Image (cartoon, grey):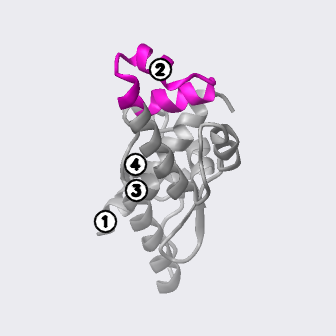
Amino acid sequence: MDISELLKVVDETMFARTGKRLNDLQRKVIEGALNHQKYVEIADVFGKSEGHVKDVGYELLQMLSDVFEEPVSKGNLKSVLERHGDINFKVGDGSFGNIGHVIGCVSFNSNEPKTESDKVPLEKTDAQRDKQISKIKKLREVGFTDDAISELLEIPLELVESVN
């Protein structure tokens, strides 16, 4: 997994767990830490003071420790991120989804969306329909668009949009 992939994992995981995205400086701190740079070097590249970058780095490592539920430092950042490359999240019906798998299988910029005949409608029984609706709502909560949900769950967009 390269640095840009690790940054995507961190950003998606942070967003899924906190609703916040990484800012540019936080991304540079992670990238610098992965490249074994000192805070002063990161500060020079980003045009900020060393103290400011240290403060951002400390706060970021604390957030990552909370998100990944284990201590994160500059020294173990890469191994923590690689271990958590497949981040699971709980869907409202009690089942689990996987951010890594979702990112890998959904093309958000696809010029060739699935045709309606390729998609599966919401299941017919009430219990199955409720389960699908719960999944749709949870995916919305973690930031997925209706288009992405439609593609991911292979449900026609109109049906996804009809879920309140």
Q: Is residue 138 visible?
A: yes
Q: Are marks 2 and 1 in contact (CB under 8 Å)?
A: no
* Callout 4 amino acid: Asp
The span from disc 3 to disc 2 (Cα, nearest Å) is 28 Å
* Residue at the spot of label 2: 40
Q: Residue at x 36, y 48 (%)?
A: 20
Marks 2 and 1, the one that precedes in the sequence = 2
Q: Is residue 78 magenta?
A: no
* Residue at the spot of label 1: 162
Frontmost residue, 143 versus 146: 143
Marks 2 and 4, the one that precedes in the sequence = 2
Labels 1, 3: front one: 3
Q: Are marks 1 and 3 in contact (CB under 8 Å)?
A: no
| 31 sits to left or right of 63 | right
- Measuring from the top left, give residue 147's x and y in whole percent: 40, 48
The span from disc 3 to disc 4 (Cα, nearest Å) is 22 Å
- Measuring from the top left, give residue 143's x and y in whole percent: 39, 52
- The numbered disc on residue 55 is none
* Residue at the spot of label 3: 18
Labels 3, 4: front one: 3
Q: Quadrant of the N terminus?
A: top right
The span from disc 4 to disc 1 (Cα, nearest Å) is 12 Å
The span from disc 2 to disc 1 (Cα, nearest Å) is 52 Å
- Measuring from the top left, give residue 65's x and y in whole percent: 54, 53
Q: Residue at x 60, y 67 (%)?
A: 96
User: Are there few (<14), some (14-19), or many (20+) residues within 10 Å of tag 4?
Assistant: some
* Residue at the spot of label 4: 147
* Callout 1 amino acid: Ser
Labels 2, 4: front one: 2
Which corner quadrant of the image does residue 150 belong to?
Answer: bottom left
